[in-house]
Image: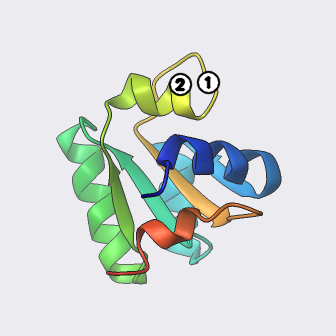
């Protein structure tokens, strides 16, 4: 079983991760995102937008088990994070979360 919070920290420190809804949508539209992580309680409008653009770009979406505060904490931020895009995983194995899909 993969520890999502640990792998997320490794990806942020060694790779390239874009935090926030606007940055995530931009990454999906440009095709740069390799995967998207969405908080469990993300607002419906954000969830719908990201799922729509994810389907269009063929980018897998992983729903984080925690809420927006917990996802922000896992990213090392003192605020809420509803969505993030993994552009480069770095030394993490975070992409293995969605390889079975």
- The colour scheme is rainbow
Please name the residue shown 22% across and 45% down the image: 45
Quadrant for the C terminus, please. Answer: bottom left
Q: Secondary structure at mark 1?
A: loop
Per the model, the C-alpha gap separating discs 2 and 1 is 5 Å
Quickly name the residue at label 1: 77
Is 51 left or right of 60, judged from the image as shown? Answer: left
The residue furthest top is: 78
Which mark, by number, is residue 51? none
Residue 85 on image: x %, y %:
55, 57
Front residue of 44/14: it is 14
Q: Position of residue 15 (x, y in %)?
A: 77, 58
Q: Position of residue 99 (x, y in %)?
A: 43, 80
Tag shown at residue 73: 2
Q: Which element type, helix, strand or loop, lies under badge 2?
A: helix
Foreground residue among 96 and 50:
96
The image shows residue 90, relative to residue 4, as above or below, that is below
Q: Judge the density around disc 2: few (<14), some (14-19), many (≥20) Cα neighbours within 10 Å.
A: some
Task: Tell me: residue 20, above or below residue 31.
Answer: above
Judged from this view, the residue extending furthest toward the right is: 14
Residue at (61, 24) in percent of width and height: 77
Looking at the image, residue 50 lies above or below residue 22: below
Which of the 4 quarters of the picture holds residue 13?
Answer: top right
Seen from this angle, which residue lies furthest front?
1
Indicate left or right for 74 with 47 as reference. Answer: right
- Residue contact at pointers 2 and 1, CB within 8 angstroms: yes
Q: Residue at x 39, y 83 (%)?
A: 58
Q: How many marks?
A: 2
Q: Nearer the viewer, residue 61 or 8?
A: 8
x, y percent for residue 34: 56, 73
Mark 1 neighbour class, 10 Å CA radius: few under 14, some 14 to 19, many 20 or more = few
């Amino acid at each position: 079983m993969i520890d999502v919070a640990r792998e997320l920290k490794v990806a942020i420190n060694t790779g390239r991760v874009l935090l926030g809804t606007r940055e995530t949508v931009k990454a999906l539209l440009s095709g740069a995102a390799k995967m998207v992580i969405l908080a469990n309680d993300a607002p419906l409008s954000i969830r719908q937008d990201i799922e729509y653009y994810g389907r269009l770009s063929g980018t897998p979406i992983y729903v984080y088990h925690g809420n927006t505060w917990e996802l922000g904490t896992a990213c090392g931020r003192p605020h809420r994070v509803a969505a993030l895009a993994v552009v480069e995983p770095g030394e993490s194995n975070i992409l293995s979360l969605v390889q079975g899909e």
